[in-house]
Amino acid sequence: MSAQPAKQFRWAAASVALLVAGTSFYQSILLIPATIYLIASLNRVQEANPSWSSILRRAYWIIALTLSSFAIYSIITIAARHELGIPRAHSLDMMTAWFRFPAGAVAWEAITAVRGELFGHGFYGNGMFATIWLAVGIILIKSFRNSQPPRQIMFTVMLLAMALIAPFILVLILGEDQPARVFLAQPIVFAGVWAIALRSEEKHLSALPAAICAIAVLSGSYTVSALFFSDTMAYEADTLLATRIVSAIYRADPEFDQEKIPVYFSGAVFTSNLWRHENFEVFGASFFSWDGGNPKRIIAFLKTTSIADLTEPSAQQIAVTQSAMAAMPSWPNPNSVRLIGNIMAVRLGHTP
């Protein structure tokens, strides 16, 4: 093997290994290389007039490396799950709408969701993304003003369309809108398209990129501050509620031993958060209302905040306790916490 192919192989192997490692943290990272490729190709088309074959040749490499990374990641995941005895998670099945609902309705829902994301209606803070259409307009105007040949303009339009859709491709694949955390490629497209649009040789426009970047940073900082402040207020409220519940447990049974007596939480507590606005998704949400009241999350929250290290009941204990809890009032009624047999039952609310 000559030096050049050997070097290319090493780079390809390193790329696959790093992408597999990244995908193991979060699967949406798998879309990042293709998104970067689209932005890089758009930049090439604006700087020169590359041939269709040169663009496709690089696309083949991106597709091959991405598919190889996904295949290796899948094999490692299946092998590790089999070796460690971990059951297959069904969350992806629940996120896929194509096989659960009529195809026409799913297609319309997916297209509507993508359109909403493209125009800034998807989630809190996404409104700034809608300004990308201004950048798209600037790029197209510059293409016509520079008298680019029709083929080059066609490449520009095609790559712009693909770049805009790339962050939201999972919406089309799965058939329904996804949480904001899935769209990891969205800031890459936003920054890349705007950077290409603002590139100019005219000196009187040199301050424009800095001004737009400053506005974007200020807007993003405001959004992030609002999200995390709502989370902070939710955390403060949760710790206060958790302390009250643990105090109620000891009032119900002064001899309560958290190592010997398991605690079962049923239902959820839905509290209002003044600082949590529409489309905040999980930000500002309470651990006591997550998933309609998830006992595992609640017990984990109590443990990580050092409020209490409670023991979870077994499935058999839960089955016995649930029937007896049906007649119990909901929190904060004093009778919402009581000992049933050898299990401390806490009725937070009605399970939705």
Image (cartoon, rainbow, N blue to C red):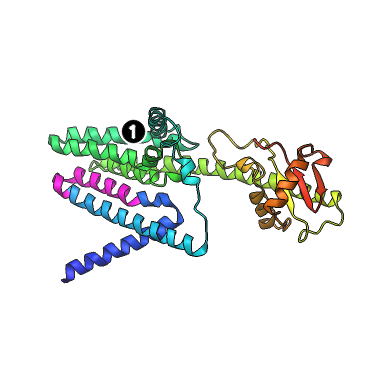
Q: Is residue 114 left or right of residue 247?
A: left
Q: Name above or below for residue 106 compared with residue 319.
A: above
Placement of 201 over or under 24, stated as above or below: above
Q: Nearer the viewer, residue 177 or 211?
A: 177
Tell me the kind of residue under disc 1: Trp
Report x, y in % for residue 309: 72, 58
Question: Which quadrant holds residue 277?
Answer: top right
Location of mark 1 (residue) = 133
Left or right position of 246 against 85: right
Q: Is residue 39 magenta?
A: yes
Mark 1 falls on what kind of element? helix
Q: Quadrant of residue 11?
A: bottom left
Q: Is residue 61 magenta?
A: no
Query: Looking at the picture, how far across and down is residue 105, in whole percent?
Result: 41, 28
| Dot 1 alpha-carbon crowd within 10 angstroms: few under 14, some 14 to 19, many 20 or more | some
Please tell me which residue is depicted at 39% across the width and 45% down the height of the picture: 187
Q: Which residues are magenta?
A: 32-54
Q: Residue at image x 78%, y 50%?
A: 344
Tell me residue 107's x, y (percent): 38, 31
Q: What is the quadrant of residue 255 in the picture?
A: bottom right
- Tell me: 351 left or right of 92: right
Of residues 83 and 235, the one drawn nearer to the viewer in this rendering = 83
For the question of whether residue 179 can be seen, the reply is: no
